[in-house]
Image: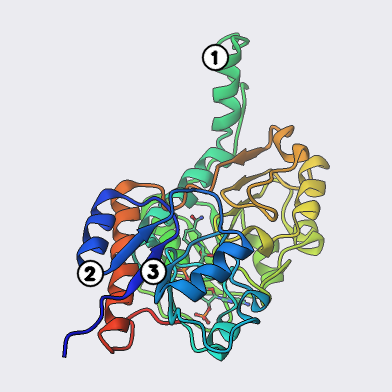
């Protein structure tokens, strides 16, 4: 018996190779819009498609599923490793499987963490602004002194795939000591010491956040943490904005209680408070963690692998 070709919605324009493969596998519709799906779009998509490839910003919360018993859609193959915008328990209650795209994003996101680490510690965004302003008066021995990174101590919060890739870069590339805070112990093949969050705040020259977002980690980092950090230390977040109490971070930066911060993600993304954009001691990136064509292609291919496995009756390799 031949199977009916599954009808699949891909929620954003994608790299061409992803669309070319999707079209060989499914009856595909590609939403021609880079904005997050609205509530009514998500509800219609659950009713009209067998599978959806949603992404960051498509908030499949419990109330989106609430009007359905079992929707036609049986599979949400998220494009991205972070899936805190999807209520996985509610999806499961309505017979919808959810998957993500781990692994494909690890190195690229670790690279952006290193970019921010260096940019923040060495004040490079501030320096670039100075050159562009035309106000640079020339080199002198005490001009724009930053924090020397080699040999310092990095503290990584969330020692998963990305956390470990950052730790590797810091240890092998920059001879840094690695501390980490994580809910379970991790075996890694380079020196790294597990410590409490407080000890990590107290002893790190650079802190990097790499835990998933969501209810469990919301505001895990707040004023107590920033008050415990050393005043020369830098704070980097490449994970999710809601892990950090952004108001507390702004207070710490405004008061000069920490050396600086480098952010790829924001609590109310894409809103970035003026209080942040006005500060010189913070480096701000527009969520660039995985922004490279080959990485976005690999993520799309992985999401398609999950859809394909699901519709072939197998367990999707990255079901969450
Ligand atoms: P992962 O391998 O699942 O690693 C997450 C780590 O966080 C795990 O080691 C986990 O501990 C730990 N963790 C989870 N909850 C914790 C808690 N409450 N307290 C302490 N540790 C906790 O995920 P990943 O692939 O490294 O990705 C991490 C996150 O990065 C993603 O969820 C996503 O939100 C974000 N991300 C951002 C970008 C970007 O563009 N900026 C790109 C990719 C990913 P266990 O091992 O004990 O479970």
Q: How far apart are the alpha carbons under marks 2 and 1?
A: 59 Å
Q: Are there few (<14), some (14-19), or many (20+) residues within 10 Å of tag 2?
A: some
Mark 1 highlights which residue?
139
Q: Quadrant of residue 65?
A: bottom right
| Front label number (3 vs 2) | 2
| Front label number (1 vs 3) | 3
Is 23 rendered above or below residue 131? below
Q: How far apart are the alpha carbons under marks 3 and 2?
A: 18 Å
State yes or no: discs 1 and 3 in contact (Cβ < 8 Å).
Answer: no
- Which of the two discs, 3 and 2, labels the residue nearer the N terminus? 2
Q: Quadrant of residue 212?
A: bottom right
Mark 3 highlights which residue?
101
* Front residue of 269 and 257: 269
Mark 2 highlights which residue?
25
Coordinates of residue 237 in the picture (x, y in percent)? 59, 55
Dot 3 falls on a residue whose secondary structure is loop
The answer to whether any part of residue 212 appears in the image is: no
The residue that appears at 69% across and 56% down in the rendered structure is 267
- Which of the two discs, 1 and 3, labels the residue nearer the N terminus? 3
- Which of the two discs, 2 and 1, labels the residue nearer the N terminus? 2
């Amino acid at each position: 018996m031949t199977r009916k070709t599954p009808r699949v919605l891909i929620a954003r324009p994608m790299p061409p190779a992803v669309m070319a493969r999707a079209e060989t596998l499914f009856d595909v519709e590609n939403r021609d819009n880079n904005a997050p799906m609205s509530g009514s779009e998500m509800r219609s998509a659950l009713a009209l498609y067998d599978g959806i490839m949603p992404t960051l910003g498509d908030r499949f919360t419990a109330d989106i599923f609430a009007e359905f018993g079992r929707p036609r859609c049986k599979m949400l193959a998220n494009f991205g490793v972070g899936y805190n915008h999807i209520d996985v328990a509610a999806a499961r209650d309505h017979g919808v499987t959810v998957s993500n795209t781990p692994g494909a994003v690890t190195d690229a996101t670790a690279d952006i963490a290193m970019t921010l680490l260096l940019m923040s510690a060495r004040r490079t965004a501030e320096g670039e602004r100075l050159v562009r302003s035309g106000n640079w008066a020339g080199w002198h021995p005490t001009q724009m002194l930053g924090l020397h990174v080699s040999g310092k101590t990095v503290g990584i919060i969330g020692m998963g795939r990305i956390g470990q890739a950052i730790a590797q870069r810091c240890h092998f590339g920059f001879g840094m000591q690695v501390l980490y805070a994580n809910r379970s112990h991790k075996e890694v093949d380079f020196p790294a010491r597990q410590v409490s969050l407080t000890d990590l705040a107290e002893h790190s020259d650079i802190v990097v956040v790499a835990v998933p977002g969501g209810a469990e980690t919301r505001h895990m980092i707040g004023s107590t943490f920033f008050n415990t950090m050393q005043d020369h230390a830098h704070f980097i977040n490449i994970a999710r904005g809601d892990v950090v109490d952004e108001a507390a971070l702004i207070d710490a930066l405004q008061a000069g209680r920490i050396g600086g911060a480098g952010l790829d993600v924001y609590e109310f993304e894409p809103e970035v408070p003026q209080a942040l954009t006005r500060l010189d001691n913070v480096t701000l990136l527009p969520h660039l963690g995985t922004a490279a064509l080959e990485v976005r292609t690999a993520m799309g291919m992985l999401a398609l692998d999950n859809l394909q496995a699901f519709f072939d009756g197998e367990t999707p390799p990255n079901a969450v």
